[in-house]
Amino acid sequence: MNNGIKITKTELLSDNWYRLNKVTYEYQKKNGEWETHIREAYDRGNGAAILLYNKEHRTVILTRQFRLPTYVNGNKDGMMIEACAGLLDENNAEDCIKKETEEETGYRIDKVQKVFEAYMSPGSVTEILYFFVAEYDKEMKISEGGGLAEEQENIEVLELDFEEALNMIRTGEIKDAKTIMLLQYAQIHALL
């Protein structure tokens, strides 16, 4: 723990969907002086994301779904093209992403490779995201995917040419950070 940080008060502002806390803390500057800071931190738990790729066909599996925060921030239809992802819940990251992959995309994968982890919005959100890649083929498809009805998921599964997906970053059709990071990882490491 950082000895230059002393949390003095945590106030729960909302526990509706996830937890929003208002935190008051003392911060010690480099010159030794202490100052009081007040920030809000949104705790939605940690998550995992995966890029499914097929070397032979040079394709990737992505999803498309409605995302309210993007809609209220000017994304005209609120639809986002994304890598498959989900919250960890009680599962570890690897088990979680295997489960999410099957629910969202319909592909059952046994082997995944963790490639990195990152805080996605560290100024306001506590979430750390674990990033994975995995190869897929048609034989792994066991259902249509689409997510879980009880979680109100309406997910469209997309199989895209890898170069097309990279171009969709350039055109702005893909604006999701985790997806951009995974596609660029695949490009840098010549997965396809």
Image (spheres, rainbow, N blue to C red):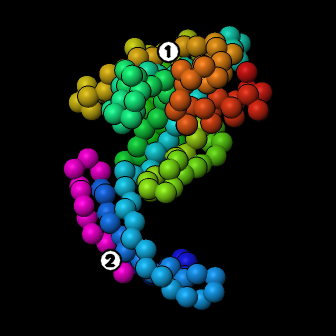
> From where the camera sits, is residue 31 visible?
yes
Front residue of 37 and 43: 37
Front residue of 31 and 120: 31
- Viewport quadrant of the C terminus: top right
**Element type at mark 1:** strand
Q: How many neighbours does mark 2 have within 10 angstroms: few (below 14), some (14-19), or many (20 or more)?
A: few
Front residue of 168 and 53: 168
What is the magenta range?
8-18
- Viewport quadrant of the N terminus: bottom right
Residue 13, magenta (yes or no): yes
**From what the image shows, is residue 59 above or below residue 102?**
above
**Chain-order first, disc 1 or disc 2:** 2
Residue 110, magenta (yes or no): no
Identified at 63% across, 86% down, the residue is: 31
**Secondary structure mostly taken by the magenta-highlighted segment of the chain:** strand
Identified at 40% across, 66% down, the residue is: 39
Seen as rendered, the residue at the extreme bottom is 32
Q: Where is residue 127 in the image (x, y as percent from the top left)?
A: 46, 52
Q: Position of residue 169 (x, y in %)?
A: 61, 24
**Element type at mark 2:** strand
Q: Given the image, on which type of amino acid does mark 2 rest?
A: Lys
Numbered badge on residue 158: 1
Numbered badge on residue 9: 2
Numbered badge on residue 108: none
**Quadrant assignment, res 29:** bottom right
Q: How far apart are marks 1 and 2 (CA)?
A: 46 Å
Q: Given the image, on which type of amino acid does mark 1 rest?
A: Leu
Front residue of 136 and 70: 70
